[in-house]
Image (spheres, rainbow, N blue to C red):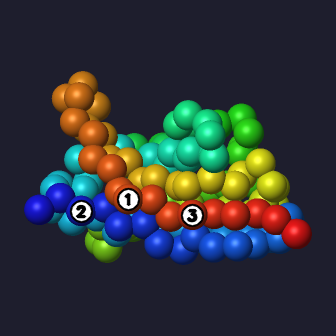
């Protein structure tokens, strides 16, 4: 059974930090690129960050310099460290696993991040 379980969301003030985790199981974790994708209320999906099987990372311009993605293959877990949070970061954050060229996508259920005073 494929599972991606996101945790770590919550309510924080602007300028605060959160660390999201995504625990994966049921597939060969090391073969997949992992991404974080978010959806703000009333908006479409927005890609946030990705890390490939070799550890190379990429970020959306909107979060570059503030967010850090990482993965621990031994734990089948991907993380998103979010610093200097802004109200516009408020969204449901989803973990995604993808095998390049295969068209295979696995999704978690999401974790809510709310940035507000």
Q: Which of the 4 quarters of the picture holds residue 85?
A: bottom right
Q: Where residue 43 sits: x, y (%)?
A: 61, 37
Give the Cα distance between marks 1 and 2. 9 Å
Q: Tell me: residue 61, above or below residue 71.
A: above
Q: Quadrant of the C terminus?
A: bottom right
Q: Residues within 10 Å of mark 1 (few under 14, many from 20)?
A: some
* Residue closest to the far left: 1
Q: Looking at the picture, does residue 14 appear above or below residue 92?
A: below
Compare marks 3 and 2 and give the one earlier in the sequence: 2
The reply to whether the C-beta atoms of the residues labelled 3 and 2 are less than 8 Å apart is no
Q: Residue at x 58, y 70 (%)?
A: 9
Which label sits in the foreground, 3 or 2?
Answer: 3
Q: Nearer the viewer, mark 1 or mark 2?
A: 1
**Which residue matches tag 1?**
109
Mark 1 or 2, nearer chain start: 2
Q: Secondary structure at mark 2?
A: strand
**Residue behind mark 3:** 112
Neighbour tally class for label 2: few under 14, some 14-19, many 20 plus, Cα within 10 Å: some
Whole-percent x, y for residue 88 in the image: 77, 48
* Count of numbered tags: 3
Q: Nearer the viewer, residue 50 or 46?
A: 46
Confirm whether residue 60 shows in the render. Answer: yes
39 on left or right of 23: right
Q: On screen, 67 above or below 49?
A: below
What residue sits 72% from the left and 52% below the top? Answer: 89
Q: Which residue is mark 2?
A: 3
Q: Dot 3: few (<14), some (14–19), or many (≥20) neighbours within 10 Å?
A: many
- Residue at 55% across / 47% down in the picture? 38
Q: Quadrant of residue 73?
A: bottom left
- The front one of 11 and 60 is 11
Q: Are marks 1 and 3 in contact (CB under 8 Å)?
A: no
Q: Which residue is at 54% across, 67% downward?
A: 20
């Amino acid at each position: 059974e494929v599972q991606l379980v996101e945790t770590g969301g919550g309510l924080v003030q602007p300028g605060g930090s959160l660390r999201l985790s995504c625990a994966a199981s049921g597939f060969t974790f090391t073969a997949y690129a992992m991404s974080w994708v978010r959806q703000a209320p009333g908006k479409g999906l927005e890609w946030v960050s990705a890390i490939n099987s070799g550890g190379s990372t990429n970020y959306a311009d909107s979060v570059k310099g503030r967010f850090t993605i990482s993965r621990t293959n031994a734990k089948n877990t991907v993380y998103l460290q979010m610093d200097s949070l802004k109200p516009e970061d408020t969204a449901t954050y989803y973990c995604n696993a993808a095998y390049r060229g295969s068209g295979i996508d696995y999704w978690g259920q999401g974790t809510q991040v709310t940035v507000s005073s």
